[in-house]
Amino acid sequence: MIGMLGVDCKILKKNNMEKKIILGFVGEMVSGKGTVAEHLQKNHRASTHRFSTMLRDVADRVYLEKSRFNLQKLSQVLRENFSQDIMARVIAEEVKNDASKIVIIEGIRRFADIEYLKRIENFKLVYITADIKTRYERLTKRQENTDDQLKTFEDFKKDHEHESESQVQEVGKTAEYIIDNKGNFDELYKQVDEILNK
């Protein structure tokens, strides 16, 4: 009886792992990654892991302003001194230990970011995109970083030349799914739910 129970538990554990859905979001700045993650959290009980969370944690610890520039600099310092995939390794471990059925990874930007993640069973890469003018309008409204509200359109275009943005489109081309976030929330959520159903 105990032996049978042990087998059943192993089968159950295996089946639970197979049902786990892991979606990694890559996209240009303000393309809607956070909005999609929030929708999946609220309506599908997904959990979310963000690459920027560890950077914000470090910024808090050393009392740095959480501006886009500072977060990008922290990322650069960590990767140049400890390895390009250091942040990916952190995220991969968090995802493996996450018991949620649906796990979201937000903020993938580089090929190094997905090297560890794509080894995890059921990982799927999703490219979320929108035109630059739409994204700029969203940036000035949301004000997530301390320097967002003062940013001009020209500043925003220059931000795309930063190292942190240089691989986004190329990584996006390797995605299994693409979400075009140029419309309203209903259109966006419909695309997300269709991907989830697949």
Image: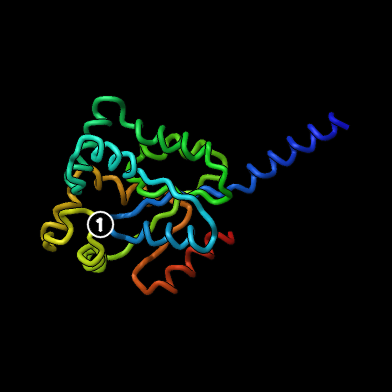
Q: Residue at x 49, y 62 (%)?
A: 42
The type of residue carrying mark 1 is Glu
Left or right, residue 73 beside residue 184:
left
Q: In front: 51, or 198?
A: 51
Q: Position of residue 77 (x, y in %)?
A: 22, 31
Q: Specify whether residue 140 is in view.
A: yes
Q: Secondary structure at mark 1?
A: loop
Q: Residue at x 58, y 61 (%)?
A: 197
Q: How many marks?
A: 1
Can you tell which quarter of the image residue 131 is in? bottom left
Q: Specify whether residue 75 is in view.
A: no
Q: Position of residue 155 (x, y in %)?
A: 12, 57
Can you tell which quarter of the image residue 196 is in? bottom right
The quadrant the N terminus occupies is top right
In the image, residue 88 above or below residue 28: above
In the image, residue 174 above or below residue 152: above
The quadrant the C terminus occupies is bottom right
Q: Position of residue 100 (x, y in %)?
A: 56, 47
What residue is pinned by disc 1? 144
Q: Position of residue 112 (x, y in %)?
A: 36, 36
